[in-house]
Amino acid sequence: FTVNVASLGASNTQVTNQTSAKYYRCTVSCPSNPDGVSNYFFMDMGSGCQCNTYCTATNAGGSCITNVSVGGLNNTTAGCSGGNYSLQSASTTLYQNTIYSFSMTNDASAITSVWFDWDNDGTFTAAEWYQVYLTGTAGSVNVSVPVTFLGQIRMRVRSRGAGNLNGSGDACTVMGGGETEDYCITIAPEPACPIPGGVTVAATSSTTASVSWTGTGSFIVEYGDATSFTIPGSDNTS
């Protein structure tokens, strides 16, 4: 602590700012007495998700969000949050150029939307919006992560009673019902081995089945007896 030392004056309250992460400690000087020196602490710059000034989301309750799921995030909540808005602590990492299934549920029939601030500019645009479902209490939509920004971004999930508007331009709309949940999620580079998403298996007869998934590149499909199947294993592959 011999560089960038600043005298902040004699006021009881001191304010400073930073443009990069720094360590801090405080020295208090009194005439004719030894200096008092605090312990040090590290102040990070935070992320755009935490520090960007996003528009206020106003809802009035009802058709509350009860679960949000994407990637490794699977967040269940009971009823609407206080004030019908919350920045949830649950998080996950999504990979660029990868398709994920985003799903959510509500406690009453709702029209639902999700926005991802892909470019981390503090706004939710129509190009960053996905309609999850128009009515009902559960649904999903495929989300493709663009090669735009690496790091932590904000995801906004909004619900509203079915029959109302909740579209691409409604990330900041004052709504007379529903709930809003924001999340901080991390965007990472595309992995060398692409991650398949939305894997489903449907029986087509007593001896055949159809397997589908979303993703890019080549994949190996392994199948076998459910009672002894292991991953990875030596079962049949195609």
Image (spheres, rainbow, N blue to C red):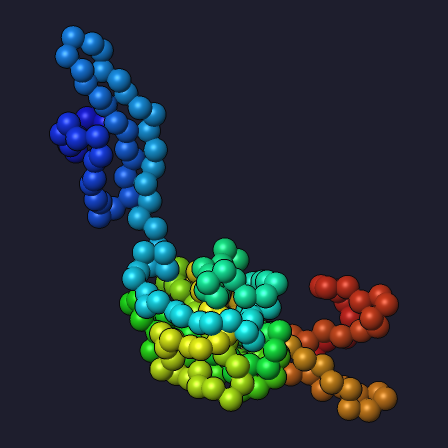
Q: Which residue lies furthest to the bottom in this view?
A: 205
Which quadrant of the view contains residue 168?
bottom left
Name the spot of residue 77 as percent of width and height, x first. 59, 62
Q: Would residue 63 appear left or right of 232 to someone viewing this image?
A: left
Q: Which of 158 and 140 is in front in this view?
A: 158
Vertical placement of 155 versus 209: above or below?
above
Asked if residue 213 can be seen in this view, the reply is no
Q: Which of 32 and 60 is in front in this view?
A: 60
Q: Residue at x 34, y 37 (%)?
A: 42
Q: Which of 86 and 48 is in front in this view?
A: 86
Name the spot of residue 55 as percent of width and height, x first. 32, 68
Q: Which residue is drawn at 32% across and 56% down?
A: 51
Q: Nearer the viewer, residue 191 or 218?
A: 191
Q: Which residue is drawn at 29% across and 62% down?
A: 53
Q: Would residue 172 appear left or right of 176 to someone viewing this image?
A: left
Q: Would residue 167 appear left or right of 11 to someone viewing this image?
A: right
Vertical placement of 192 versus 217: above or below?
above
Asked if residue 235 can be seen in this view, the reply is yes
Q: In which quarter of the image is the C terminus?
A: bottom right
Q: Quadrant of the N terminus?
A: top left
Q: Residue at x 71, y 63 (%)?
A: 232
Q: Which residue lies furthest to the top in this view?
A: 32
Name the spot of residue 52 as percent of width and height, x first. 30, 60
Name the spot of residue 141 as percent of width and height, x first. 54, 81
